Amino acid sequence: MKGDTIQYRAGYKYSLWQTYRVQIGIRGQTVQHRLFTLDPDGWLTIFEDYPWDGPSGPTIDTPSFMRGSLVHDALYEMLRLGLLPHDPCFHQANLELEKICLEDGMWPCRARYVFTAVEKFGSADAALHPEKIITAP
């Protein structure tokens, strides 16, 4: 018996086990979304089961990169959906990635390389476009 069609999002490798909350440097913005929220004081909440793809590019998924990639992916998703203004939030999202990676023990030269890479090549990933939903069958 054939059931109804399903809708899903592709391209995700990880799913957040429990809700995560952190204060970041993006202030004065309010975002309400089913996957995350951001309040004007910079408190970012990413809800349980949030899907993300981990560190991107020519890199490996190390423990010092995972929390930064989670926060960075959520912020880029907010940018893509038009929930945050590109200027200055794109740059601040990249700074948050570097800061969190350093806090988690990433070597400073690697954290600076990661920051430089997302500053130079990440703009297309943060560009405004609607969420792509795939339907099957």
Image: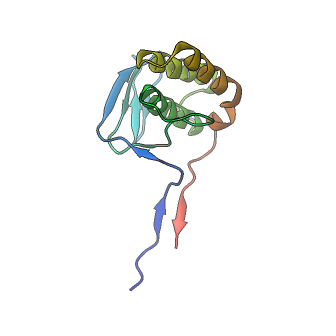
Q: Is residue 76 visible?
A: yes
Residue sitting at x 33%, y 27%: 21
- Quarter placement of the N terminus: bottom left
- Closer to us: 91 or 41: 91
Residue 51: x %, y % from top left: 43, 45
Left or right side of 134 for 70: left
Q: Is residue 117 left or right of residue 136?
A: right
Give residue 125's position: percent from left, percent from top.
64, 37
In the rendered image of this protein, does residue 127 appear above or below residue 15?
Answer: above
- The count of marks equals 0
Say which residue appears at 53% left-offset and 35% top-offset: 60
Q: In the figure, residue 104 lies in which quadrant? A: top left
Relative to 126, does residue 90 appear above or below in the rendering? above
Residue 111 falls in which quadrant of the image?
Answer: top right
Q: Look at the picture and state if 132 lies above or below 43.
A: below
Q: Position of residue 101 (x, y in %)?
A: 47, 21
| Residue 27 visible in the snapshot | no
Residue at 65 percent across and 20 percent down: it is: 116
- Given the current orientation, which residue lies at the most extreme bottom position? 1
Image position of 21 (left or right of 117): left
Q: How is the image coloured?
A: rainbow
